[in-house]
Image (cartoon, grey):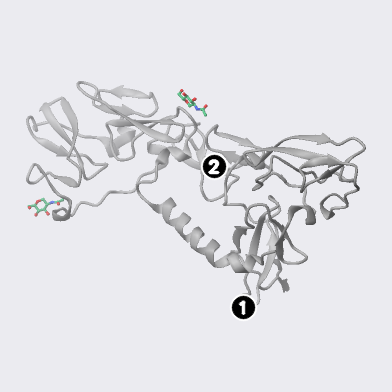
Amino acid sequence: MEKPGAILGVALLLLLQALDLVNARNEDICRLFSNNTVIRDPESCSQSITCIDSVSYYSRCTGSTPFFDKDAGKCVKSLSTSMSSCSISCDDRTSQFLADPKSCYGYYYCADEETPMYGTCPQDTHFNATTQMCSHQHESDCTTSTFEYCSIVKNSVNFDNLQGCNKYHVCEKGVLKDMTCSKTYYQASTGECVDKALVDCDAHPLPTEVCGKAGKPYENKFVADDVTCRGYFYCAKQKDGTPDPNPMWSQCPQDRFFDAASQMCLAPTAVKCSFDRCDGRTADFVESDTKGCRSYLRCSDGVTVGEYSCGNYFFDEELGACTPSVQTYTACK
Ligand SMILES: *[C@@H]1O[C@H](CO)[C@@H](O)[C@H](O)[C@H]1NC(C)=O
Ligand SMILES: *[C@@H]1O[C@H](CO)[C@@H](O)[C@H](O)[C@H]1NC(C)=O
């Protein structure tokens, strides 16, 4: 039996690392998009990204169609003025290099007044329009600009919003909308709202009044996350006596479930919980919560794939088998 508190330090560290990863520039943008979605590269007006199994595959527009049109999903000669942040003009610039407005390392070479040709500087160098050369990154004052999702994704394509397991985005007429799955979680790989147990996500939405009511807050207390059997929130005591508005989520180690009454992580059979009992389990067969302790679940990759009955026998979780000896686990009382 472990007190969740004992592992809180580690959980905090992991959480901070996770946040760091989300912010990291090199995190693959395709983790947000469903399989085979094509978007414009946020760092180039002339490259597209095809997302395959959450990994980015780049394609470059060349020759007389140097720009990628995210709405048409193909390379075009020029972009409409609504994509003005991608407008590059070679008028009076024949044989010159122009900076790419989307990145520090991209450039266009004007082959003639009509034909900008996209190119990129070698690794660790930036393009400098003044010197017309790629020079070492540390000599450059170029900083990459932020981008708007709706300038790289076409309308009506769902994509993940990492702020919450149930949240996602969609662009409508070029405007970013926040969407929420009702009673389900958003699955980035399929672009759909699906059963919560099928989504591997730690940004669980806070249950209503998770840390108590205004006059009666839970202070320094662990509360169930109401979505999983292992997860809990830690409600810290607030200086002003209000409920913790931002309790931290964490979860019990493998093969342990959270028990609110004892404030501990216990053996799953000792905890009543009707969420997915296969979550975080190492066994292939586990006790179900069906009353009488005569049923068991089959688990695959931490998800329940079926429930079966032992008939007149009882399911013994330790043996992983049906036995004639009576079982009276709390889980299935
Ligand atoms: C994603 O798409 C690729 C290419 O079409 C395909 O090979 C792959 O199996 C797909 N992945 C899934 C999880 O369906
Ligand atoms: C380009 O190079 C010039 C000359 O070395 C320098 O003064 C200027 O700051 C550079 N521009 C950028 C954007 O780095």
| Furthest residue in direction bottom, as rendered | 239
| Furthest residue in direction top, as rendered | 64
Q: Amino acid at mark 1?
A: Asp
Label 2 lies in ligand 1 vicinity (Cβ under 8 Å): no
Q: Position of residue 47 (x, y in %)?
A: 29, 31
Vertical relation: 246 (above or below) 316:
below
Residue 287 located left or right of residue 136: right
**Viewer-side residue, 119 vs 320:** 320
Vertical relation: 290 (above or below) 21:
above
Q: Residue at x 22, y 24 (%)?
A: 62
Q: Secondary structure at mark 1?
A: loop
Q: Amino acid at mark 2?
A: Tyr
| Furthest residue in direction right, as rendered | 312
- As measured in the structure, the alpha-carbon distance from the residue carrying label 1 to the one carrying label 2 is 34 Å
Q: From the image, tell me which residue sits under label 1.
A: 240
Residue 269 located left or right of residue 49: right
Is any atom of residue 125 visible in this view? yes
Packing grade of label 1 (10 A; few <14, some 14-19, many >=20) is few
- Return the disc, 1 or 2, that comes first in the chain's sequence: 2
Q: Residue at x 37, y 29 (%)?
A: 70
Q: Position of residue 183 (x, y in %)?
A: 69, 43
Q: Position of residue 161 (x, y in %)?
A: 51, 45
Residue 124 located left or right of residue 184: left
Q: From the image, tell me which residue sits under label 2.
A: 168
Packing grade of label 2 (10 A; few <14, some 14-19, many >=20) is many
